[in-house]
Amino acid sequence: MSGSPALTIGVLEGDDIGHEIVPAACRIADAAARASGLAIDWRPLPIGRKALDEVGHTMPPGTLETLGTLDGFVLGPIGHQAYPKVPAAINPHPILRKTFDLFANVRPTRSYPGIGCLYDDIDLVIVRENNEGFQPDRNVVAGSGEFRPTEDMTISVRVITRLGSRKVATAALELARARRKRLTVVHKDTVFKLGCGMFVEECHKAAQDYPDVTVDEVIVDTFAMKLVREPQRFDVVVTTNMFGDILTDEAAGLVGGLGMAPGLCIGRGEIAMAQATHGSAPDIAGKGIANPYAMIESTRMLIEWLGRRRGNAAAGHASALMKAGLDAALADPATRTPDIRGTGSQADMVAGILKAMENTTHAAA
Ligand code: ATP
């Protein structure tokens, strides 16, 4: 295998455990790519606390400009709550998602044996709207969607648009079509008659172009309960930003915790961003025990997505190889981190994945 066009992928380590799990993800992706005849041109770029200390801004303009020229990028977790309160220390998330119109956050939840999942047969994907909703740093052009008219009153504004709803619904329907052809729309239109009402309307309108996909609706509080009691009944779920934020953490809790919660942010454009669901976990940074699964799987999803979009067979092969490596490492407690009932360190897990990929490559040769 050779001759597939190279992919250029930005590397933004982020903060805290990002400095461990992002290099791990790139190392594994690079090994899989090499074994598959795929060249990846990795472009490390400054972001986050390290960028603030070194170049004076958490989101340097050069980073954004360069990202716009690439095929995709890997973003590590950002610990912006701990940034000093200075104007140059902004949260880069909303800027990245808005600039590249990454309106759909695709977050899968899958069971693996032996790691502490509450059920052994979960396989669902929550598609979270990414660029509007209640998130005050994303839902207005200038200023914030939260404001305080008097000392004793705060108003938080939720933005729902027809276009934003339609776009994320279409992304979820595409995904459902490629999976078990079931889409569940999660909302609360019993209370948010206009906002959730519009979201639901647009989901149903978009679904008219997908007659092969069965669409149902569940009210968000009922969904939160059903997700715990019978997660197997769900395939693809689409919901607004804040509901998606909460429900994806709940879903992660079913399958071993936040270390098992990957994500890929996609939009209409040609660029996508690999981003795990979890935060920068400062409590375990530097201890060598952070679970790299979510970051590696997010990177694998990016490579698979790029392979499909660009018709790049070698990228598809690299993604399959990464999956084989992850499955094998997760099957052995010695190559799993402690959060998922393992006895290994992060380095053991990375070594286990690399070894399993090597074995898979040799077996196929
Ligand atoms: P954010 O609001 O930025 O999403 P958070 O407040 O939810 O962050 P996290 O940083 O995600 O917090 O951490 C929550 C808990 O999950 C912490 O105890 C942390 O150690 C744990 N955790 C998060 N990611 C991982 C991981 N990859 N491996 C192991 N434990 C993790």
Image: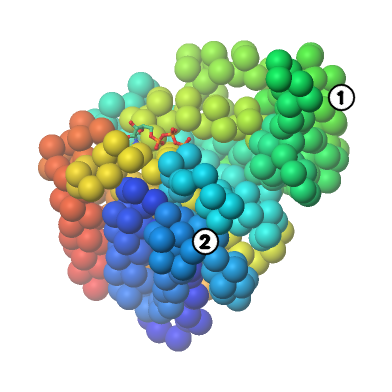
Of mark 1 and mark 2, the one earlier in the sequence is: 2
Taking the image as shown, residue 184 lies to the left or right of residue 30, namely right
Look at mark 1 in the image and give the residue it sits on. Answer: 194
Across and down, in percent, residue 208 comes to 84, 40
Residue type beneath disc 1: Leu
Query: In this picture, is 164 found above or below 250?
Result: below
Q: Please state which of the two labelled residues, at mark 1 or mark 2, is closer to the viewer.
A: 2
* SS under mark 1: loop
The residue nearer to you, when weighing 134 against 243, is 134
Mark 1 vs mark 2, CA separation in Å: 39 Å
Element type at mark 2: loop
Counting from the top left corner in percent of width and height, residue 84 is at 47, 46
Place residue 305 in its image quadrant. bottom right
Q: Residue at x 29, y 58 (%)?
A: 24
Kind of residue at disc 2: His
273 relative to 177, above or below: below
Q: Residue at x 74, y 44 (%)?
A: 143
Is residue 198 left or right of 233 when viewed as pictured? right
Instruction: Identify the residue under disc 2.
Output: 57
Which quadrant would the N terminus be assigned to in this image? bottom left
Q: Residue at 60% x, 76% y: name it.
A: 69
Q: Is residue 145 above or below residue 168?
A: above
Q: How is the image coloured?
A: rainbow
Considering depth in this image, is 258 or 283 the residue closer to the camera? 283
Image quarter where ligand 1 lies: top left
* Extreme residue in the bottom direction: 3
Tell me which residue sits at (29%, 36%) in the image: 283
| Label drawn at residue 283 | none
Residue 117: quarter of image: top left
The answer to whether the beta carbon of the residue marked 2 is less than 8 Å from any atom of ligand 1 is no
Quadrant of the image containing the C terminus: bottom left
